[in-house]
Amino acid sequence: MNHLPDEPATLHMTARVWAGIDAGIDNVVSLAAVDGDEQAVRIGRDIRQAGWDQVPWVNGDWPPFDQIIAIRLTRAQWQFAADNARESIPIYEELQDEKSAQLCRDALATIEAGSANRCGHVESELQRHLESQTTLARPVAIGAGAAGVAMVSV
């Protein structure tokens, strides 16, 4: 089944992973503005605004970085964010900035896990699991890196 680029998808991740995605997109927007790439500026700003509108801010600050948050973007926007993370990894490695490189890896793993499950296979498995539980349900980690949890809702 083909999915349209403007089809929305919600990914669940730690606030830390989203903060890294947001920072990476901020860098893209800044560079694109200098280069005159208006399309990249628009897409990047739209992604950041969507995130700002959805982050559960705590008195105007980021939520705790280990808190799981849900961000809903279009598939094209997620692809833009994944491409940015993928392209940034070798740059950070060359700069010997392992912390930033790992944050990009975590973001990419989270986005790719959501993308790989775009047909809802994971969600239906998760739903069946939750329905079979008689106790309080807890999130199931899917394709998670050390710092993030990836679940998808369509």
Image: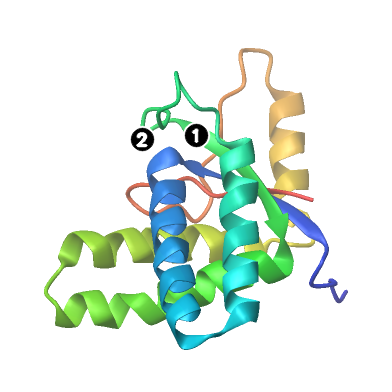
The structure residue drawn at horizontal position 63% and vertical position 39%, both measured from the top left corner, is 53
- Residue 68 shows which numbered tag? 1
Q: Is residue 5 above or below residue 36?
A: above
Residue ID for mark 2: 65
Residue at 88% x, 74% y is 1
Horizontal and vertical percent position of residue 5: 79, 72
Q: Secondary structure at mark 2?
A: loop
Residue at image location 62% in from the left, 79% down from the top = 38
Assess disc 2: are there few (<14), some (14-19) or many (≥20) residues with their C-alpha within 10 Å of its C-alpha: some
Q: Quadrant of residue 117?
A: bottom right
| Disc number for residue 46 | none
From the top left corner, tell me how far across and down residue 22 is, in percent.
Answer: 46, 54
Q: Which of 151 and 75 lies nearest the eye of the viewer?
A: 75
Residue at screen point 85% across, 72% down: 4
Indicate the secondary structure of the residue bearing disc 1: strand
Amino acid at circle 1: Ile
Q: Amino acid at mark 2?
A: Phe
- In this rendering, the answer to whether 91 lies above or below 126 is below
Question: How far across and how far down the image is residue 10, in percent?
Answer: 69, 48
